[in-house]
Image (cartoon, rainbow, N blue to C red):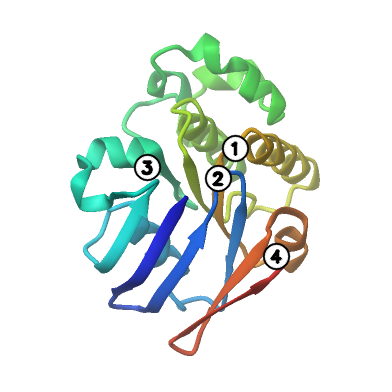
Amino acid sequence: MLVVDNLARPGMPTVSFSIAAGRCLAVMGPSGSGKTLLLRAIADLDPSTGSIALDGADKFSVPAPDWRRRISYVAAEPGWWATTPAEHFEDWEAAASLADALLLSLDLADTPLSQLSTGERQRFALIRALVQTPAFLLLDEPTGPPDAAATAATERLLRQRLHAGTGIILVTHDADQADRLSDNVLTLDNCKAEEGAA
């Protein structure tokens, strides 16, 4: 269980919610409403006030690297520190089945990241998060670029992870995607946060 209580930071409304393992919360709202800021605060990437606890353990009681392994954030445009996707994995061969599930040709793993599309980089970043087997995934528009086949493959894999007990907080502008994946929707708008059923 992830419990967020009175979480606040500049640029977003104060937010409180809880989400159980194996459940998906969609976060929606107009651009600039604080959706990405919310994910970054939960991931302990930016300063915030309020409390966040995972299975009863407060964020401040867990070393930051351990927290970020248990609650893994995948940005809309992820950061990279090496030339190719494969260099970002301790054991790329072990991750290859995930690439296949996400319709990524295995030879792309050795292709310079600068030559990959935004969608391909997003899917490799999702794999990078998944191999850590986090308790929760924080996904910032993981299917942003319009590619129906890749979107379907990504959603299929996310449903498998939900079924296996991984919790997901999903930022999306796609109401249909929220309906397909989420159990509840948190809407950020006009400096307010409102939770409702998907």
Percent x, y for residue 137?
A: 50, 45
Answer few, some or many: residues within 10 Å of disc 4's Cα (few below 14, many 20 plus, some between 14 and 19). Answer: some
Q: Nearer the viewer, residue 192 or 98?
A: 192
**Mark in the foreground, 2 or 4:** 2
Give the quadrant of residue 9: bottom left
**Mark in the foreground, 4 or 1:** 1
The disc at residue 21 is 2
- Taking the spot 62% from the left edge, 24% from the top edge, the residue there is 98
Residue behind mark 4: 174
> Is 97 rendered above or below residue 53?
above
Taking the image as shown, residue 28 lies to the left or right of residue 67, namely: right
Taking the image as shown, residue 115 lies to the left or right of residue 48, namely: right
Residue behind mark 3: 79
The disc at residue 165 is 1
**Mark in the foreground, 4 or 3:** 4
Sequence order check: which comes first, mark 4 or mark 1?
1
Q: CA distance from mark 4 to mark 1?
A: 24 Å
Local SS, label 1: loop
Q: Nearer the viewer, residue 82 or 180?
A: 180
Instruction: Name the kind of residue labelled 4 in the image.
Output: Asp
Q: Where, quadrant-wise, is the C terminus in this rendering?
A: bottom right
